Structures are given as structure tokens and as C-alpha cells.
Amino acid sequence: MSDTAYIIEERESCLVFKITRPHRLNAITTEVLNGLCDCIDTLEDQEGNRGLVITGEGERAFCAGTDLFERETLSSRQQREKSDRARHLLVRLHRAPFISIAALNGLAYGGGLELALACVFRIANEDVQCSLPEVKIGLIPAYAGTQLLPSIVGQSRALDMMLTGRAVSTEEALQIGLINRVAAADISLIDQAVEYLESITQYSKTAINAIRHSAAESGAQLSDYGLEIEKDWVERVAQSEDAHEGVAAFRKKRKPIFKHR
């Protein structure tokens, strides 16, 4: 059992943030939030195209949500402050200018699923369960889950999950777009998450962020506003050093060397 609530592993292409509280199903404490904040600060201060992989220790849980044992020690004001801070932090992660991947090694419930939803992508083991069960105890998702889940799986599917509180399997989560990939059983989940991240971050950070910003403005229907956003990014990216390098490399049949990676 780790003496700390989390560990941060430095890799060339990313930071790996692991919640190390398997005895509490990796539930979120104030210390966990502090560690996640440090990771985001570090990556936002760097120029390189590094990313973040988030996972949990053990085989049972990625994260079971907020730690109810800690919650009982907090005043009502402190509970609200923790909830507000967690929501702000997950929204910040969701909008951060780097790629984040949640590596789901076990169940992801409540705030744990919201943490995964805040990441850009999700990769999961075969036997994962995902749920926002707050309605069962008279609460609602507190860490932006009511906004994140519909944006990923659609309003109807999101309401089905949130109003019943039911858990979805890895298979169903993949079908509805809640997770992006299912991990191979014979290879380290974290290694697969890092490889997934590197398959993206090898490209121009300028182009990656332009695609993300443009996609963020898309809605259920094609909109003139979204098209204008895309047009603006197309023109800006086309004049970038990375775009010139990419086209030149294609013509010369060589691998591009992007400056902004």
C-alpha cells in the first residue's frame, strides 16, 4: 500500500498520474486533486507536445468517485469548496492544450467517471464498469458530469445512465462512444495508453489544437458559426511552419520534422 495518494511517473512523451489508494478504490481526496493540479500546471508550462495519462492502482478500480470518508470530516462549506475545486479542475483538464488519456483499469464510478470524461480519450480493460450513480442517493454528478457525458455519448444515452444510475460494461461503453479503445489483455494498460497518446503527439501541436478547437464548436447540426471557426483555423494553420514542413516532407517523401511537438 502506498503512503501517498498518488504517484507521478515521468516519461519522454507524457506524465503518468496514478491514484494509489486501492484500499479505497482510488477514491478522490483533496490530496489527489492537489496532485492532478500539479500535473496540469507542469504540462501547461511546457512548450513540447507532451501529454497526460491518468490511471488507478490495482485491478478493481480506476476511481470510485469522491472519498465519502473524507467527506464526513468536512463541513458543509468545505464540501462545497472541494466540489467546486474538483469541477473547476476537471473542466480545466478537459480544455487543456495537451492530450490526456484515461486508462481505465477497473470500475469508474461517479467522480471517477467524470475524471475519465474530462480526458480527451479513454482506453479500458475488458471488464470495466462505468456509472454515474449519484441519483441513487439523491444527488447529481458534481464534477461537470451532467455536461461532459451528454457531449460525448449524446443526451438520450447520458440521461439513461444518469437517471437510472446503472453501470455500463466495457462493450456497451465502446458501442456508445464512452470509451475509445479496449486494451489488449496481454500488454500493460499504461503502455498501451502511452502508445495511444504517442500516436497523436508525434504530429504538429499547432494542427492538433486547431482540430480540437474546431471540433469543440461542432453541434448536433452543422452550423455557420462552426464552419467559420473551422475556416479561421484552416487559414491560420496553413501559414504555420509545421504546415510548410509537412507539405515539403510529403513532396520529398520523407518524415516531417515538426517544430511544435
Image (cartoon, rainbow, N blue to C red):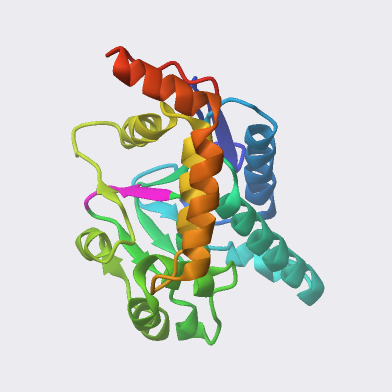
What residue do we see at 51% from left, 75% from top? 146
Q: Number of callouts in the render?
A: 0
Where residue 98 appears, as percent x and y from the top left, is 54, 39
- In the foreground, 178 or 250: 250
**Residue 18 visible (yes or no):** no
- In the foreground, 38 or 230: 230
The image quarter in which residue 195 lies: top left
- In the foreground, 38 or 28: 38
The image quarter in which residue 44 lies: top right
Q: Image check: 16 left or right of 86?
A: left
Where residue 50 appears, as percent x and y from the top left, is 53, 29
- In the foreground, 221 or 35: 221
Residue 138 drawn in magenta: no
Predominant secondary structure in magenta?
A: strand
Where residue 82 appears, as percent x and y from the top left, is 71, 63
The image quarter in which residue 68 lies: bottom right
Where residue 130 appears, as percent x and y from the top left, is 35, 64
Residue 71 higher or lower than 235, as above or below: below
What residue do we see at 43% from left, 76% from top? 133
**Residue 81 visible (yes or no):** yes
Residue 43 higher or lower than 139, as above or below: above
What residue do we see at 71% from left, 60% from top? 85
Residue 124 drawn in magenta: yes
Residue 260 higher or lower than 24, as above or below: above
Residue 223 higher or lower than 45, as above or below: below
Q: Which residues are magenta?
A: 121-126
What residue do we see at 24% from left, 59% from top? 174
Q: Image check: 114 left or right of 156?
A: right
